[in-house]
Image (spheres, rainbow, N blue to C red):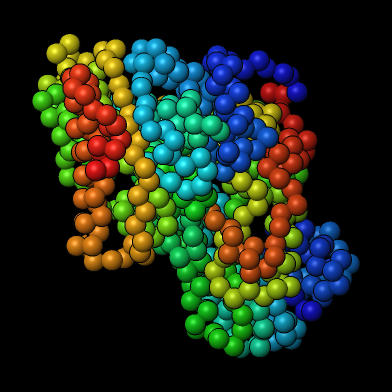
Amino acid sequence: MRSRARFRLPVDPEVRERLDRLEIPFNEYGVDPYGISKHYLGPSFTALKFFFKHYFSVESHGIENVPAHGRVMLVGNHSGGVALDGAMTHASMFFEMNPPRLAQGMAEKFLNKVPFASQITNRCGHLTGLPEHAERLLADERMLMVFPEGARGTAKLFKERYSLVHFGTGFVRLAMKMKTPIVPFAFLGGGEAIPTISNAVSIGKLIGVPYIPVTPWLFAVPLPAKLEVYYSPPMVFEGTGSEEDEVVYGYVEQVKERIAGLIDAGRRRRRGEPVRDPLKAGAA
Amino acid sequence: MKVLVPGIGGRLGKMLAQRLIELGHDVIGIDRRPFRDAPAGVEMHEVDIRKRAAEDVFRRVRPQAVLHMATVTHLVVQSEDRYRINLGGTRAVFEHSHTYGVEHVVFVGRHTYYGAAADSPLFHNEDEPPMGLASFPELADLVAADLYAGSALWRYPSFVTSVLRMVYTLGPTGHGTLATFLRGRRVPTLLGFDPLFQFMHEQDVINALCTTLDKRPRGVFNVSGPQPVPLSMVIRETGRSNVPIPEMIFSMMLGRLGLPKLPAGALEHIKYPVTVDGSAFKKATGFVHAIDEKGAMRAYREAFPRPIR
């Protein structure tokens, strides 16, 4: 058989070393049973490294609160018109955890219909947001990254950047059913990096996405704003996941309050106000 | 044990016949197609499963087990004929099995039952409905045959029914949908999509069928072997070239430029994955695959090297 050289994107040595330490059952070709591929993760994390460490110089607090092994759900707020929050939290888990962990997001359903987006999100571990996927990944002791605000959250305008919109309840039911700890986290600065002044819904529908964020410079090209992530200690809710709505709403509110507390403390810290321990402030 | 195999004339049927003879079973075959080089010991009946002569075989032989492989899967056969064979034939197999005291009936179905769609999950469980059928209605007869076979679980409690949903086959005989798709030098794919493909080496398929005969699991089971791999990888590891084509152009090319005339829904199967969770079958039978994904792809490549032109 004729041998053909294959084009490969460059991979940073640190990324390569960390990829080898990921606790994911890759086969001989570097592909896991879900189709997550080292050949996609390598270039993806190499690009994310520049944004994570230099462009946004993301600062994370409380990384020790994130379990090093086993099933866990990272639950956070959306911040910024595109999935900057997800990408940087994904990078934070990879570059700051030891051993590194792969935070798997749940991709919006429309993405799977978009050429290339479908391929890239799947190969990087962000499977379509279906309950079956979430359950299966947790059963396999993976780390899920969940934004209960959904697309409503990324549509927040600049003036709403520190607010929280309605949280779905599915994530708490899932955590209870799968006996999974929830690590609430707050993501700050996305609204400054991509200050959305309006959302173009009609144009978005034309190209098959829910909306397109419009910034003062038209496109959602992010500014090098300072981004921060605050990870709170895990919360565990006992139950089966089929409890009455009132019970589940109560737990959802607890998670939402924890995140709101973290956002508030982080915001005060960003303004230069003295906050002794923003993580405790969030938990209080 | 007397094992009757409707559909023995296919590639897999022939391999199965050989293995069953080696295991010491009495093998009786039914097929419209001739089985010329049948191994010694195979009692062959060249009849249509839906005809009276096939019932006579059941009456005379009184098999203990029936392994039903007489379904048509390729889409070039006219759909009316396919319906008659796949549904009428399956009905005949189950009714004769009931009438003539068969102890165990195995229906060999396919994992494409679940269908491929943008919002369908990876690793389907047996209790999921065939959601992908809407985009590919041409598979309705196979899905109906599968569900009909499943209804035998309550319709005919007198015998054990095993409904198997097998993943694609890949191996040196070049048998099956995936193997046929990979046959050429260049393999067309959809630009921007790279679904996972789940397949088993044909020896493992035969092993799984023999294990089913041995263990007699009652119920509907997905049968899978090694982990799935992306289509681009299957193409590369079998020595082919991947030719990604934008979907709109691909649809227009179907039936032209050397591409087979396929229903538009067939494209969903190279756009989105159909993968199954085979753990229930493994738990019920103890089945373990012997050949991994690399071994299956290599076996195919060695048997069918990249065509020169």
* Nearer the observer, A128 or B86: A128
In the shown orientation, is residue B103 left or right of residue B75?
right
The picture places residue A267, in percent across and down from the top left corner, at: 20, 26
Snapshot quadrant of residue A165: top left
The picture places residue A45, in percent across and down from the top left corner, at: 48, 22
> Can you say which quadrant of the picture contains the N terminus of chain B?
bottom right
Q: Residue at x 22, y 31 (%)?
A: A265
In the image, residue B154 sits, relative to residue B285, either above or below, namely below
* Nearer the observer, A151 or A276: A276
In the image, residue B222 sits, relative to residue A254, either above or below, namely below
The picture places residue B203, in percent across and down from the top left corner, at: 75, 54
In the shown orientation, is residue A126 left or right of residue B298?
left
* Nearer the observer, B141 or A113: A113
* Nearer the observer, A108 or A102: A102
Look at the image and tell me whether residue A233 can be seen: yes
Q: Residue at x 70, y 62 (%)?
A: B287
Snapshot quadrant of residue B39: bottom right
Snapshot quadrant of residue A174: bottom left
Look at the image and tell me whether residue B122 can be seen: no
Q: Residue at x 47, y 22 (%)?
A: A44
Q: Residue at x 25, y 55 (%)?
A: A251
In the shown orientation, is residue B280 left or right of residue A65?
right
The picture places residue A179, in percent across and down from the top left corner, at: 42, 57
